[in-house]
Image (cartoon, helix red, strand yellow):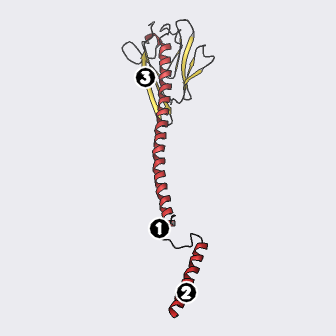
């Protein structure tokens, strides 16, 4: 009888423990190999790995955005410089003559002249802006911005020597260096007016 009493007591204790475990929350029960869910260590490791992968992905995306921005800035600078130099070259070709009356101002940052129609035209570099006029200097329009100071125009005679006299002018050399952010582009051309 003692064995059966002892067996009954063990059975009663096992039933009570099973009943208690069914009422308890899943977090209070000991983890078994077949239990479903994650431990705190597994969650922390997952967060660390996802953070590392996100950081790598962010750096790759940031490099792409930076490369696009640099190329866009470079393209804008090149376009602005090319457009300004081409327009100046096209209009300088139309200087009426090399007389002092047709080229009243001729220095490194300013060129004022009369074109073949008798209209006074000109280009002027002031405060980093390259400007153009076609009404005797009454109004100026901006051709290009962010041009560091320095001569834009160089005047050459028919032997290629620099000159300051209108009567010996044969070629006008144009050089514009446009800067935007870290990008800088220098455009150069040499123009021979048609009527010389």
Pick whichever of labels 2 and 1 is earlier in the sequence. Answer: 2
Q: Residue furthest left?
A: 159
Q: Residues within 10 Å of mark 1 (few under 14, many from 20)?
A: few
At mark 2, the secondary structure is helix
Q: CA distance from mark 3 to mark 1?
A: 78 Å
Tell me which residue sits at (47%, 11%) in the image: 93
Pick whichever of labels 3 and 2 is earlier in the sequence. Answer: 2
Determine which of the numbered discs, if any, sits on residue 188 in the image.
3
At mark 3, the secondary structure is strand
Q: Which residue is mark 2?
A: 8
Q: x, y percentage for residue 14?
A: 54, 81
The quarter holding residue 20 reads bottom right
Given residues 38 and 108, the one toward you in this image is 38
Q: Residues within 10 Å of mark 3 (few under 14, many from 20)?
A: some
Q: Which residue is mark 1?
A: 34
Q: CA distance from mark 2 to mark 1?
A: 30 Å
Tell me which residue sits at (44%, 8%) in the image: 194
Given residues 36 and 9, the one toward you in this image is 9
Tell me which residue sits at (50%, 13%) in the image: 91
Q: Nearer the viewer, mark 3 or mark 1?
A: 1
- What is the total number of numbered labels drawn onto the structure image? 3
């Amino acid at each position: 009888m003692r064995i059966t009493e002892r067996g009954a007591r063990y059975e009663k204790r096992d039933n009570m423990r099973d009943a208690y475990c069914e009422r308890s929350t899943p977090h209070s029960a000991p983890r078994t190999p077949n239990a479903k869910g994650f431990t705190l260590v597994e969650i922390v490791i997952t967060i660390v790995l996802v953070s590392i992968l996100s950081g790598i992905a962010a750096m790759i995306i940031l490099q792409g955005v930076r490369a696009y921005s640099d190329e866009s800035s470079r393209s804008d600078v090149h376009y602005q410089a090319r457009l300004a130099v081409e327009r100046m070259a096209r209009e300088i070709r139309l200087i009426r003559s090399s007389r002092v009356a047709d080229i009243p101002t001729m220095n490194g940052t300013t060129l004022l002249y009369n074109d073949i129609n008798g209209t006074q035209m000109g280009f002027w570099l002031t405060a980093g802006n390259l400007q153009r006029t076609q009404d005797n200097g009454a109004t100026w329009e901006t051709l290009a911005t962010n041009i560091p100071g320095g001569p834009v125009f160089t005047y050459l005679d028919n032997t290629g020597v620099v000159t300051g006299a209108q009567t010996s002018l044969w070629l006008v050399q144009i050089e514009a260096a446009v800067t935007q952010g870290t990008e800088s582009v220098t455009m150069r051309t040499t123009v021979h007016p048609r009527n010389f």
